[in-house]
């Protein structure tokens, strides 16, 4: 009974219904991190263009979700 509750909680948190082996887990984690890095790089490119066009740094930060420090460094 308790084991079923734990399994359901893990499935809810991870969004998976099947267990993962260590290798599969690491590959999945690296894929997600790669997508996040790609989104961050794209946000930096957009922010740089916005900065060239004289957008307010606060506006750039709000729209790109980048920190003000990251934008100032561009």
Image (spheres, rainbow, N blue to C red):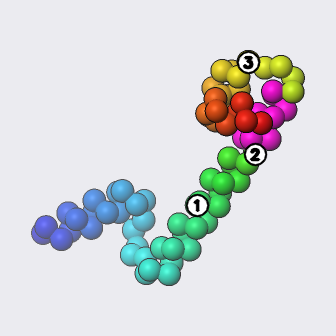
Bounds of the magenta span? 43-51
Given contact means CB atoms under 8 Å apart, are the residues at marks 2 and 3 in contact?
Answer: no
Residue 44, magenta (yes or no): yes
Q: What element carries label 2?
A: helix
Q: Residue 4 in the image: x percent, y percent?
A: 20, 68
Given contact means CB atoms under 8 Å apart, are the residues at marks 1 and 2 in contact?
Answer: no
Q: Which mark is residue 42?
A: 2
Q: How crowded is mark 1: few (under 14 residues within 10 Å), some or many (20 or more)?
A: few
Q: Residue 66 in the image: x percent, y percent?
A: 64, 35
- Mark 3 vs mark 1, CA separation in Å: 31 Å
Rendered position, 43 above or below 61: below
Quadrant in which the N terminus is drawn: bottom left
Rendered position, 13 above or below 42: below
Residue 46, magenta (yes or no): yes
Q: How crowded is mark 3: few (under 14 residues within 10 Å), some or many (20 or more)?
A: few
User: Which residue matches tag 1?
Assistant: 32
The image quadrant of residue 37 is bottom right
Q: Earlier in the sequence, mark 1 or mark 2?
A: 1
Residue that extends furthest to the front in the rendered view of this protein: 73
Magenta region, mostly helix, strand or loop?
helix
User: Which residue matches tag 3?
Assistant: 56
Q: Residue 18 in the image: x percent, y percent?
A: 40, 73
Quadrant in which the C terminus is drawn: top right
Seen in the image, is 55 located left or right of residue 25? right
**47 or 25, which lies in front?**
47
Residue for point 35% across, 57% down: 12
Rendered position, 32 above or below 44: below
Q: Which of marks 2 and 3 is nearer the N terminus?
A: 2
Q: Is mark 3 on a helix, strand or loop?
A: loop
The nearer-to-camera label among 3 and 1 is 3
């Amino acid at each position: 009974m308790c084991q079923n509750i734990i399994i359901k909680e893990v499935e809810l948190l991870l969004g998976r219904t099947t267990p993962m082996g260590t290798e599969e887990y690491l590959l999945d984690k690296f894929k997600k991190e790669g997508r996040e890095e790609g989104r961050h790089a794209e946000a930096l490119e957009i922010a740089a263009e916005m900065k060239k066009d004289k957008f307010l740094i606060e506006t750039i930060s709000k729209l790109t979700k980048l920190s003000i420090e990251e934008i100032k460094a561009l």
